Amino acid sequence: MEKTRGKLLLLAIAMQLSAWGTAEAAGPAFMHTGGRTTQPVGHYEFCRQLPQECNERTPKQAPVQLTRKLWATIVNINNSVNTRVMPRTDMEQWGKEEVWSYPDNGFGDCEDYALEKRRELMSAGVPAGNLLMTVARQPNGDGHAVLTVRTSLGEFILDNLEPRVLAWTDTDYTYLKRQSDQNSGVWVTINDGRADAVASVR
């Protein structure tokens, strides 16, 4: 089982690395963000538990330069976390509807995957202001959390439900809000532009 998962991980990484040319040629695509909005309840509680996670200040700057090396790092971390962490709902783990936490026990749901990818990319040197927790709505209406990576070639989505790293415009989600690129404890609205987005989400 472990050997099979390892082979699948290597295959997924190889396919994504071969997509580098597509990412490079696609041209920058950035979300349109608006003013400050409510912080998701789960993130608010996460900040109370780990205040240092929500006090990161990033001066306004250009998105991180997307090099071939950084693309490989993004793809590797995305696949590694998706493979290592096993899906488990907050209710199953904690007996509560909404708990944001690092999946240090090997289990988590969508926001836990995204938090771990953010932590590992920050450790790899990507500034906090380019790694934004993001809330979206799936086509079936369910809420979802992903990690948005701001780069010089556009914004890409790291998702536990999708093995590929996709440009945000290539996903089927309606984006609602995300962390500010200057203050990790502040959230801003997203005007998706592709559909009528409702900016009220838990």
Image (cartoon, grey):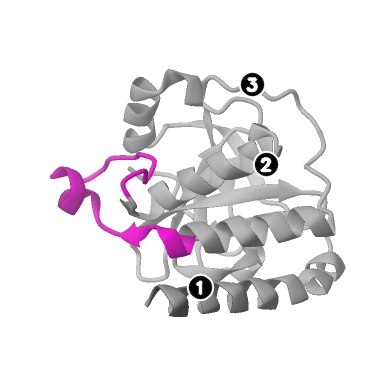
Residue at position x 41%, y 72% from top? 2
Residue type highlighted by circle 2: Ala
Q: Earlier in the sequence, mark 3 or mark 2?
A: 3
Residue type highlighted by circle 1: Gly
- Residue 35, how many percent across, how many down? 58, 32
- Residue 57's tag is 3
Residue at position x 40%, y 25% from top? 47
Element class at badge 2:
loop
Residue 176 can be seen, yes or no: yes
Which numbered disc, 1 or 2, marks the residue closer to the eye?
A: 1
At label 1, counting other C-alpha atoms closer than 10 Å, the crowd grade (few under 14, some 14-19, many 20 or more) is few
Q: CA distance from mark 3 to mark 2?
A: 18 Å
At label 3, counting other C-alpha atoms closer than 10 Å, the crowd grade (few under 14, some 14-19, many 20 or more) is some
Residue type highlighted by circle 3: Arg
Question: Where on the picture, by quarter, is residue 38?
Answer: top left
Q: Earlier in the sequence, mark 1 or mark 3?
A: 1
Q: Quick one: 104 or 48, which is closer to the camera?
A: 104
Which numbered disc, 3 or 2, marks the residue closer to the eye?
A: 2
- Residue 45, how many percent across, how many down? 32, 28
Q: Which residue is mark 2?
A: 124
Farthest residue to the left: give it: 95
Element class at badge 1:
helix
Residue numbers of the magenta segment: 82-105
Q: Earlier in the sequence, mark 1 or mark 2?
A: 1
Question: Where on the picture, by quarter, is residue 57?
Answer: top right
Which numbered disc, 1 or 3, marks the residue closer to the eye?
A: 1
100 is within the stretch colored magenta: yes
- Residue 167, how many percent across, how many down? 67, 63
Residue at position x 63%, y 37% from top? 122
Q: Quadrant of the C terminus?
A: top left
